[in-house]
Amino acid sequence: MTYAGEMYFASLFAAAFLIFATTCHLASIAVTAIRCRKNAQVPPLCAHPSVTVVRPVCGLDNFVEETLRSSFELDYLDYEVIFCVASERDPVVPLVRRLIAEHPRTPARLLVGDERVSTNPKLNNCVKGWNAAAHDWIVLADSNLLMPPDYLQRLFARWDAETGLVCAPPVGSHPANFWAEIECAFLNTYQLRWQYLGEAIGRGFAQGKTMLWRRDLLERAGGIAALSAEIAEDAASTKVVRTAGLEVRLARPPFAQPLGRRGAIEVWNRQMRWARLRRACFPGYFFPEILGGLVPPALAAAVVASEFGAPVAASLLALAVVWYSGEMLLARIAGWHVSPLYPVQGLVRDLLLPAVWLAGVMGSEFVWRGNEMTTAEDDEPLPRQA
């Protein structure tokens, strides 16, 4: 085959990839917009089962008082809240005790202790809360999650006979600087929409930010300690549910995580940590991530434009307009934060995606809340509590 023939077939391949990537991108936007639209009606519950909400706490996050206070403001008939902390010296302890004292009508308590069943400090912190739960429905919810009044109704609305777990990815809100805006671009209009598309095609993944469990289901799998089978408790949860022949459902719409100010290193470290965890727990799904974002289809568009004599710059601009206007429309429909400068923020995110993927491939160590951890199976030291 001549060089011209090779280039022609290469351009056809690039065109096919461009069409496929753009179609998937727009499909993920459409699916997420339908499932996460603002003010979607939550179906009324036929019953209100008693619930235990377990919230592991560690340190003083941005908006921590607002997120923890929301635990006491749920519009639900019968629930208790169990806060879990590893050390009495943690700076969040006085705040938790004050909030409990301010809300005597809501059954709530703080459990202190470090019961290590795994190399995952968050899971270790949750064990005592799970064991102390008074009810058979248990929610594990991160301390930086903002619970709306209908939080539990949204979770139960997604439960049916084929469900083993209901969760929700976080929606970044209240960004206070440029890098917090970048984190919103990662969380909301990229990672979240792919999770909802995955659920739509029957491949839902658990998200540790919030998880509604039925106690007997997890107990049959070995109890909460069974979530130590993977370094990430949400990855282990996904596998427990799938092994049981059940589905992971996502709440509609999902719940906010207020961000405040973020630094570049903070955003990078979080994305790198998640990439390394995905590579370790779900490598078959992780490796195709190199094709995500605008960069690969933009390269394909440049090849196609140059081969067929179209202006390359204009072609790339047209693709970017389609790409980011779709994401901005999704954020508008869902009621999420979106900046007029979003195309710049989305481009920065997409330029970072290949580097995040490479960091996920090339390393195994990361730090979570002062705990040095690793995804390497042959090198798993017990975490050091900060």
Image: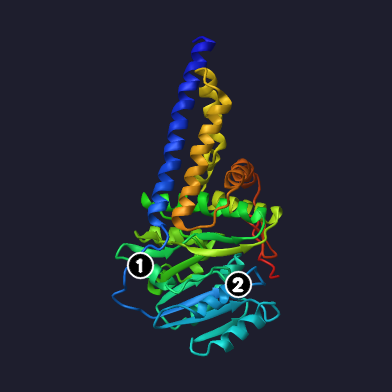
Give coordinates of residue 143: x percent, y percent.
57, 71
Residue 112 lies, in percent from the top left, at 62, 81
Determine crowd level at label 1: few under 14, some 14-19, many 20+ residues with C-alpha closer than 10 A: some
Q: Is residue 376 visible?
A: no
- Relative depth, front residue between 206 and 307: 307
Q: Which residue is situated farthest in the front direction here? A: 340
Q: How many marks?
A: 2
Please state if 348 lies on the left or on the right of 23 as rendered. Answer: right
Which residue occupies 32% across, 68% down?
Answer: 43
In the rendered view, would you say 329 is above or below 249?
above
Mark 2 lies on residue: 116
Circle 2 residues within 10 Å: few <14, some 14–19, many ≥20: some
Task: Give the residue at x 64% y 81%.
Answer: 95
Closest to the observer, 305 or 295: 305
Which of the two discs, 2 and 1, sits closer to the camera? Answer: 1
Residue type, label 1: Val
| Distance of label 2 from label 1 (alpha carbons) | 38 Å
Residue 18 visible from this viewpoint: yes
The residue indicated by pointer 1 is: 42
